[in-house]
Amino acid sequence: MAHRRARPSARRLVDALLLIAAVALLLGGTAAPAQTLLAAGPVVPDVPLKSGSPAAAASIELSGPTDAARIEPAGSTHAPALRLPPEPDAAAQARLQRLRSVATAPAKRGSAAEKAAAHSAWVLGLLYLHGEGVALDRAQALRWFERAQALGEPMAGAGLAWCQIDGCQGPPDPAAARPWIERMDKADPGLALLLQWWVHERQAPLRTAGPQTSNAPAPDDGHAALLQRAARAGNASAMNELGLADVAARRLPQALAQFRQAALRSPAAAANAELLAARLDQQQTPSAAHPPAQRSAHEWLEQARRYHRGEGVPSNYTEAIRLYQIAAASGSQEARRMLELIYSRPSPDGMVNVPWMRQLATMQLSPEGAVLSMQPPPTPRLFVRDPTPLYGLIPPQWRTGRPIGQP
């Protein structure tokens, strides 16, 4: 009986050995790659393992493929080349260098060469004062004005006076400009009067709003008289200042006349004249300017866009919607699509959704009403003055044509 009971145990032992051999045979195929993979890692010195430690147990072999493809970076691995700023205009730089050479050339007192050097130094001061063709550098402008004055340039006092009024080097000191202004009376009386006005403007106390009566005299009659005298003497910047005062007082026709009179000698006055003329034209009612029977659907649409975007007129969404409706009734698909977009997002109270209208003002629609692109947001144009009262004295050939003006 004991011999018979031992046979099943022997069979179980043989089966177990066969199973272990099969498992070992299967694992043997991945042992070599695993060892190879481990060998590719960092080399660690052999440390004797203590018995009973977890590391002393049978090592766990890796399963699955170990030769996965290498991961490559997506896109180009080369950084784009750095873009250098464009080189300055070689011809302009050569002209500027010649101007410096003339301004610094030694010359005899009273000679034509000295007069040329004085005028060149004066022009260089104007260029550095306004950043025209050179980097803006008021301290450098002051040095050129001083050289022009030392060489006998009659207009140099204007540059030295403005540097005291505005502060080319250090804080402004308007009172220190008076001696230089007095020397300008013969060279340019209108500019001298305007610089006196600027001295009063910078020294005047801050004007505060207070109760005023219609019969109360203006507190700055003498100050305003300086500006009017400068304008009558032909100074374009003074005319532009009077035009700005007329705009503030809603005397628009007078303002337009002032701007147009100064437009040829003041870029700011020319820009103000164009802007004011456009606004006066837009203030006319569409029916008075062009009867409905004579205005096309496209013209109604353009008029609606002007009021929608505030181009030449203050933004007026109510007027814009009215004009869009007229354009749509005249057959404009763009106007009809714009009205659909406007009505698609009313405000919670059922009124016009102002943020949505502002966003729609940047959309450009196709004739079929599809959104083609987003235009830059409308930027209101402002009435401006030249950067300084001396800007108009820069010779035209030295102006770069960049946008100018200060509100």
Image (cartoon, rainbow, N blue to C red):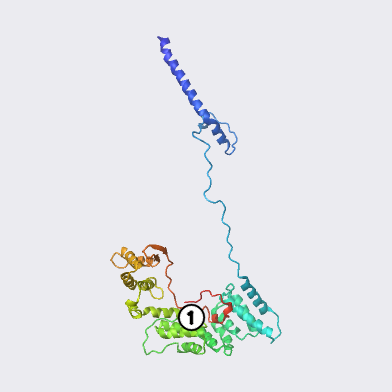
Q: Position of residue 139 (x, y in %)?
A: 60, 75
* Residue 135 image offset from top left, x and y in percent: 58, 72
143 left or right of 228?
right
Foreground: 39 or 134? Answer: 134
Disc 1 marks a residue whose amino acid type is Ala
Q: Nearer the viewer, residue 162 or 154?
A: 154
Q: Tell whether 77 sits left or right of 300.
A: right
Name the residue furthest top. Answer: 1
- Under tag 1, what secondary structure? helix
Q: Which residue is mark 1?
A: 270
183 or 387: nearer the viewer:
387
Asked if residue 59 is positioned above or below residue 141 in the image, the reply reads: above
Quadrant into which the N terminus falls: top left
The residue drawn where x is 42% and y is 15% is 8
Q: On screen, 9 above or below 106? A: above
Can residue 8 be seen here? yes
Left-right relation of 203 to 355: right
Q: How many marks?
A: 1
Relative to residue 114, is residue 50 depicted above or below?
above
Q: Position of residue 252 (x, y in %)?
A: 40, 83
Name the residue: 60% across, 78% down. 125
Residue under the image location 46 percent in, 87 percent down? 224
Percent across and percent down for residue 153 are 63, 85
Does residue 200 appear anywhere in the picture?
no
